[in-house]
Image (tube, rainbow, N blue to C red):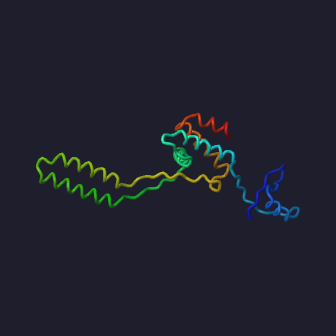
Amino acid sequence: MKIWLAKKGRGFLPTDEDSERVHARFGDGECAEFEVVRPRSLQWHRMYFGICREIGKNQEPMRDEGSIDAELRVRAGHFDVLIVGKDDGLEKLARAVDTVVTTIRANLLGAERLAKVLDAIAMALHERAEKNEVRVPKRIAFAKLDADQWADLWPSLELAIRETFGETYIEHGRMAG
């Protein structure tokens, strides 16, 4: 069972009715094991997403807060890297275009211009078929980041906001929060 306790002096007191019921069942001196998880500030959370909303409203075209949040997490370095594998279909198509280019060059006089166009297409297909790095933002849900982890991440998010969208949003967020 999960209960919420708040520090008061040298002890901890229940913060809601469920926690009070569990707390009341304990006798004096009885011990229990608790896992300490410091949830992050709801105000801080609201301030951050308020900043994301404000930034999104001022983009052309307008963007939603989720889009801004994802970009900021990547810019702040809070992401996982996925390697997306080679696209065999594109690779086969690129090889087919290579064959057509070779055939045109070998058999048709004056077709160099067409061969150059097809060559460019083949090169583009080869490039698209290669593996790509994709940056996927890590989660920042309350269950994923406690107060200490959020405090560690915040300076890089704040820097990403300042460098990408300007100082105004940080100051506006602090006044609104």
What residue do we see at 31% from left, 53% from top?
125
Q: Residue furthest right?
A: 28
Instruction: Tell me if 108 is positioned left or right of 80 in this view.
Output: left
The quadrant the C terminus occupies is: top right
Q: Position of residue 37 (x, y in %)?
A: 70, 55
The quadrant the N terminus occupies is: bottom right
72 is higher (above) or lower (below) than 143: above
Q: Position of residue 24 (x, y in %)?
A: 85, 63
What residue do we see at 67% from left, 45% from top?
44
Count every numbered label the image shows and give the total. 0
Nearer to me, 34 or 50: 50
Instruction: Tell me if 147 is positioned left or right of 58 in this view.
Output: right
What residue do we see at 69% from left, 45% from top?
43
Q: Quadrant of residue 176?
A: top right
Q: Position of residue 95 (x, y in %)?
A: 26, 57
Q: Position of residue 140 (x, y in %)?
A: 60, 52
